[in-house]
Image (tube, rainbow, N blue to C red):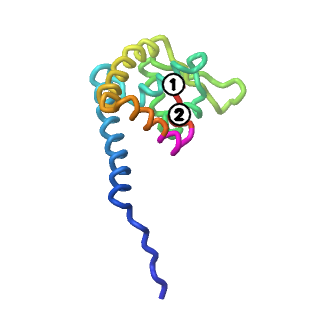
Amino acid sequence: MTESILPTLLTPRELRAWRGMLRVHQTLVRALDAELEREHGLSLTSYEVLLFLGDSEGGRLRMHDLATQVLLSRSGLTRLADRLERDRLIERQACDSDARGSFAVITGEGRGKLAAARATHLDGVRRHFLSHLSRQEQDMLGDTWERILPGSAQSS
């Protein structure tokens, strides 16, 4: 008879760190999403798409690269891009070098929506998160995220 190998449970300290991170993330995402929806009729994920496009060279990214940056599946990004395109915030352009690929391109209307929503979002990030941390704690968290996932806390 084989004994089952039981996993070692997380210690109370480990559990507090892990669950705390999950709860804080979930709460912040919900609050930021609700503020963007209320003020601008824009979900947090839609805002992130506009942000990545607005900050990219030429205001455009390949759909595959955009999906990776906003942590969506290709089909999830396709559905979101359909809505953003319907709202004239982005447009899609065919890729000359790859007939199967396409680019998402932010429109002038999209840039306007991004500019208005950016102020709301940044205010929310500061109010809901950064205001609770000293500068040293912000540095410590940035260093921690980098240790866990190199490149995750880069400022660019």
* Foreground of the two, 65 or 74: 65
Q: Is residue 128 above or below residue 27?
A: above
**Element type at mark 2:** helix
Region of the chain picked out in magenta, as a range? 144-150
> Please, which residue is most extreme toward the bottom here?
1
- Residue 135 placement: quadrant: top left
Please tell me which residue is depicted at 57% across the width and 30% down the height of the picture.
Answer: 63
* Foreground of the two, 101 or 15: 15
- Residue under numbered circle 2: 69
Badge 1: few (under 14), some or many (20 or more) residues near its Cα, within 10 Å?
some
Please tell me which residue is depicted at 53% across the width and 31% down the height of the picture.
Answer: 154
Please tell me which residue is depicted at 35% across the width and 29% down the height of the picture.
Answer: 130
Residue 104, percent from left and from top:
55, 24
| The stretch drawn in magenta includes residue 13 | no
| Amino acid type, mark 1 | Phe
Report the side of 121 relative to 75 (left or right).
left
Residue 83, percent from left and from top:
43, 27
* Foreground of the two, 133 or 39: 133
- Residue under numbered circle 1: 52
| Amino acid type, mark 2 | Gln
- Residue 38 placement: quadrant: top left
Report the side of 57 relative to 114 (left or right).
right
- Do labels 1 and 2 touch, CB within 8 Å? yes
